[in-house]
Amino acid sequence: MSAGKSSRLPIANRAVAYKEHAVNGPYGLVISKSPINRIVVSRILQDCGIKPAAMEVCAALALLQSSVPLLIVIDAGRDLAAFDTLFVNLETLGGGAPPTIFLKQDHEAGLPPYPFNGVTAMPVTVETFRPLIDNCLSSTPAVLQEA
């Protein structure tokens, strides 16, 4: 690439690229507005042996139209309204929805109206997050873990 041009794909094109990523094997979908949080959670998923696909909510919605991940990790931050469409789409999957972990920003705040398989408070560490991932991927029913 020449100087001054970005090598990043537009969001819509990234979703198409991740569609191929998903076809090549199971993956964990990390959805967050924060690029830093997407990287941190992706690294933890990699440490657990799960291939991560990290993106913002709009790209994740496009990806979920074509494939179902092994696991979904949602970091909505304090703006839960931006994730309403995602929660509606996950509810339409019903019993076919993958295990979903919600990263809670505020101990005082309530949870969105979605049946999460696990909830943990930010900041996420390998020591607290890895057992939650393992429990969600096993046959263990809903897990609630507050840090």
Image (cartoon, rainbow, N blue to C red):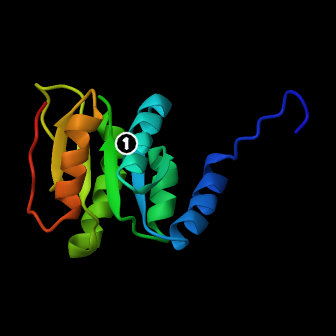
State which quarter of the image contains the N terminus.
Answer: top right
Q: Position of residue 39 (x, y in %)?
A: 47, 36
Seen at 18% across and 38% down, the residue is 120
Q: Is 92 on the left-hand or right-hand side of 25?
A: left
- Asked whether the viewer can see residue 113, the reply is no
Q: Position of residue 53 (x, y in %)?
A: 49, 53
Seen at 68% across and 46% down, the residue is 10
Q: Secondary structure at mark 1?
A: helix
Q: Is 17 on the left-hand or right-hand side of 43?
A: right
**Count of numbered labels shown in the rendering:** 1
In the rendered view, would you say 146 is above or below 66?
A: above
Circle 1 packing at 10 Å, graded few (<14), some (14-19), many (20+), is: some
Q: Which picture quadrant has residue 115?
A: bottom left
Q: In terms of depth relative to the viewer, which is nearer, 1 or 63?
A: 1
Q: Is 107 on the left-hand or right-hand side of 52?
A: left
- Asked whether the viewer can see residue 85, the reply is yes
Seen at 43% across and 67% down, the residue is 26
Farthest right residue in view: 2
Seen at 24% across and 41% down, the residue is 129
Q: In terms of depth relative to the viewer, which is nearer, 147 or 98?
A: 147
Residue that carries the numbered disc 1 in the rendered image: 44
Q: Which picture quadrant has residue 102?
A: top left
Q: In terms of depth relative to the viewer, which is nearer, 140 or 31?
A: 140
Q: Position of residue 29 (x, y in %)?
A: 41, 54
State which quarter of the image contains the C terminus.
Answer: top left
Q: In terms of depth relative to the viewer, which is nearer, 126 or 41?
A: 126
Q: Position of residue 130 (x, y in %)?
A: 25, 45
Name the residue type under label 1: Ile
